[in-house]
Image (cartoon, rainbow, N blue to C red):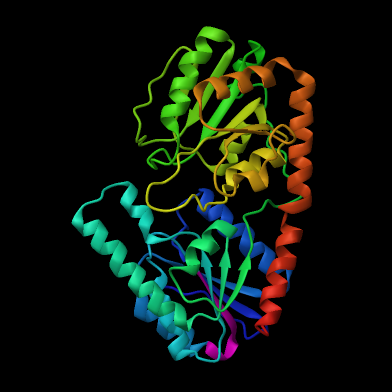
Amino acid sequence: MRHPTFNNKKYTLAYIVPYIASHSNAISVNISRRKKVLENLGYIVCLIEQKNTHFFSTLRFLWSNKQCLNGIMIRIDGTCMLDKYTILKLICPGVPLIWEIHGFPEERLIFTEDIYEKWFVWKNNMKRRFLSYLVDACIFISNEIQLYANEKIHLRKTAIIPNFVQTPIENHSIGPRHALSYLLKNNCRVVLWGGSGDLPWQALDIIQKTADVMYKLDKHIIFVIVGSNYWHPMKSEANMLLLNPMSPEQFLQLVSIAHICLALYHKPKFFPFYFCPMKILDYMSMEKAVIATNLGTIPKLIQNGYNGFLTNNAIKDISAKILLITRDAMLSQKLSRNAKKAVAMHFNHTVAQKQYSALLQSLSI
């Protein structure tokens, strides 16, 4: 395995993350944004991407360079794949170690509840609790996930650093020759959804039913769905266009032509909705009217009727709000402007920098 090179400069952080080199998705974008914030603070960030292989060579590499290290940060999620790197604390005891927590193993139970998965969840929860005693601090993406973690792991120092956008916002508008530009020429109103279609907490069934109802109410409203491997069977309709997954840059081009962006979720069965959906922040930063489920941390992002709409996932409620936005230009503009303003004030890289700085200084990093 080829490792990155340390350059013997002060303030070097090792940032251990899932393997992302061949992927361009929400995880890679999130990692890139957080790495950039740390670099803006003056740290030299050594990004170490792991596939669940070369474990011992990575430990040996970091141990041999421990004199250059000021801190180690590990991205922790529901796969539990990188938890084991916490034992770096045993071979580099003087180096502060931070968990950046994005999820817990219970997420696997949404796919199947067989005895193997239950064993996986129990085993990894026990392992994570044990390893947490080696951790100097934890970063959480939401208050909800921190509250959940209180019962699962040992906590010392903590900080809540939600997902955020990089400002100023880049221009992602599409040209007149873009394949979907005909939707605008035909006076259509685009309702956009994008995400991981295989996750059952994505309310794809609600979107399909809403599209069916909307076709009877207004045939100029077109649903554009971006994803694959849908847990709920999605079918192309006269008012629904299904597109394959695309790069974040291409997806943001679609956001630029959308009139409404949907962020609809079901409450997970085995754990609270503790996510901080990055796509909602991207939608808001691009001045789009958002309709999102009133769940978990989402009401902290969206104030109903001020910078977007919250919904209880009732088809009638979602349909009414889509019609209201598409037929009231002043309301749509108000929601969009306020959405961008909220993100610019509370969920931008400058705010994140201050939050990271406070935590790292408290650890003398």
Q: Residue at x 53, y 49 (%)?
A: 26
Task: Determine whether 110 is above or below 355 in the image.
Answer: above
Residue 13: x percent and y percent?
60, 77
Q: Residue at x 66, y 45 (%)?
A: 301
Q: Majority secondary structure of the magenta segment?
A: strand
Q: In which quadrant will I find the N terminus?
A: bottom left
Whether residue 226 is visible here, answered yes or no, is: yes
Query: How many numbered circles does the render carry?
Result: 0
Residue 199: x percent and y percent?
39, 43
Whether residue 54 is visible here, answered yes or no, is: no
Task: Determine whether 35 is above or below 247 in the image.
Answer: below
Left or right placement of residue 348 versus residue 255 in this view: right
Task: Determine whether 288 is above or below 190 in the image.
Answer: below
Res. 248 image quadrant: top right
Provide the residue span drawn in magenta. Answer: 66-74
Q: Nearer the viewer, residue 334 or 33?
A: 334
Residue 10: x percent and y percent?
68, 84
Res. 298 image quadrant: top right
Res. 91 image quadrant: bottom left
Magenta region includes residue 69: yes
Q: In which quadrant will I find the C terminus?
A: bottom right
Left or right placement of residue 336 versus residue 182 in this view: right
Q: Residue at x 51, y 8 (%)?
A: 216
Magenta region includes residue 134: no
Residue 362: x percent and y percent?
69, 81
Q: Nearer the viewer, residue 182 or 227?
A: 227
Q: Residue at x 49, y 49 (%)?
A: 273
